[in-house]
């Protein structure tokens, strides 16, 4: 990808609404599925016709117009994957802070994991009390730039996650021990808040924010291709399935099983 194109990607990432910036999937899932969608795009961008009769066998993504989905979309996806990977490495290096900064760097990582897990767990297409609870916590902790604010956010998200501990543990490789760690980190950060953030901690925070901006942009690009695929291949469900998220399908199935189990247990309790 050209330098100018990369500069455009970076400008788009910087221009994102801060309220939308988040890593809503486990990092490895986002990157892996983005590569899959890029390959899907390459495979199905052009229509397919019978060699002799020229009969249309299936449409192509190009049918919705180059302005909506340009031929360079796969290159853009793969370039974003590279940028997100590089940003993840930068964050991990920055988070390897010297003595005295571990709690701050770890706190931002744990908060990122909690928000990603709760966002995805509650994203079931139904607006209910859980969504209201998460929105309330998010609005109360929209700025975590200070040590005290980070501590408050960790405590609030840990409190919310604790109510859904059984559902969260093992969900998308989420480690339930992070809930208790978040509460402990909140206490530790409050104790050291008077000292203020170190330079290393500030760098780690900025690196995490940049990674999340690029991840959000990548998520948007993946969603754009998937929306187009659902429309273009609406009469070809097997092709649509190739573009959808295996992770999300499995997560929805797990939620349905969990809900069915809860309903069964409730019915059993009512009759006993």
Image (tube, rainbow, N blue to C red):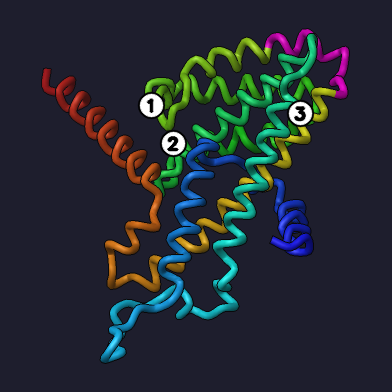
189 to 92, vertically: above or below: above
Q: How far apart are marks 1 and 3 (CA)?
A: 30 Å
Which label sits in the foreground, 1 or 3? 3
Callout 1: 10 Å neighbours few (<14), some, many (20+)? some
Do residues under tags 1 and 2 come within 8 Å of each other at their CB atoms? yes
Which label sits in the foreground, 2 or 3? 3
Specify the label residue 204 is tagged with. 3
User: In the depicted view, which residue is nearer to us: 250 or 49?
Assistant: 49
Residue receiving disc 2 = 121
Callout 2: 10 Å neighbours few (<14), some, many (20+)? many
198 to 205, vertically: above or below: above
Residue receiving disc 1 = 167
Q: What stretch is highlighted in magenta?
A: 187-199
Judged left or right of residue 258, residue 86 is: right
Q: Looking at the image, is mark 1 or mark 2 earlier in the sequence?
A: 2
95 to 43, vertically: above or below: above
Residue 19 visible: no
Judged left or right of residue 16, residue 201 is: right
Which residue does the image show at 68% across and 46% down from the upper left? Answer: 213
Q: Where is residue 197 in the image (x, y as percent from the top left)?
A: 84, 21
Helix, strand or loop: magenta stretch? helix
Residue 102 counted in the magenta span: no
């Amino acid at each position: 990808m050209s330098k100018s194109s990369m500069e455009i990607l970076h400008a788009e990432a910087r221009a994102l609404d801060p309220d939308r910036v988040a890593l809503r999937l486990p990092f490895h899932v986002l990157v892996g599925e983005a590569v899959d969608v890029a390959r899907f795009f390459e495979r199905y961008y052009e229509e397919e016709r019978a060699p002799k009769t020229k009969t249309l066998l299936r449409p192509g993504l190009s049918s919705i117009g180059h302005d909506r989905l340009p031929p360079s979309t796969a290159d853009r996806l793969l370039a974003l994957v590279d940028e997100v990977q590089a940003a993840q490495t930068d964050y991990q290096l920055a988070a390897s802070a010297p003595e005295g900064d571990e709690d701050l760097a770890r706190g931002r990582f744990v908060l990122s994991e909690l928000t990603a897990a709760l966002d995805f767990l509650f994203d079931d297409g139904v607006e209910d009390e859980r969504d209201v609870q998460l929105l309330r916590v998010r609005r109360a902790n929209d700025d975590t730039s200070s040590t005290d604010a980070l501590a408050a956010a960790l405590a609030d998200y840990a409190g919310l996650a604790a109510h859904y501990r059984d559902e969260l543990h093992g969900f998308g490789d989420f480690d339930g021990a992070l809930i208790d760690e978040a509460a402990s980190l909140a206490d530790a950060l409050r104790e050291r808040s008077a000292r203020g953030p170190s330079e290393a901690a500030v760098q780690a925070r900025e690196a995490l924010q940049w990674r999340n901006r690029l991840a959000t942009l990548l998520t948007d690009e993946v969603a754009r291709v998937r929306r187009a695929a659902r429309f273009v291949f609406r009469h070809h469900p097997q092709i649509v399935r190739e573009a959808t998220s295996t992770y999300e399908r499995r997560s929805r199935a797990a939620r349905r099983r969990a809900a069915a189990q809860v309903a069964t247990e409730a019915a059993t309790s009512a009759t006993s």
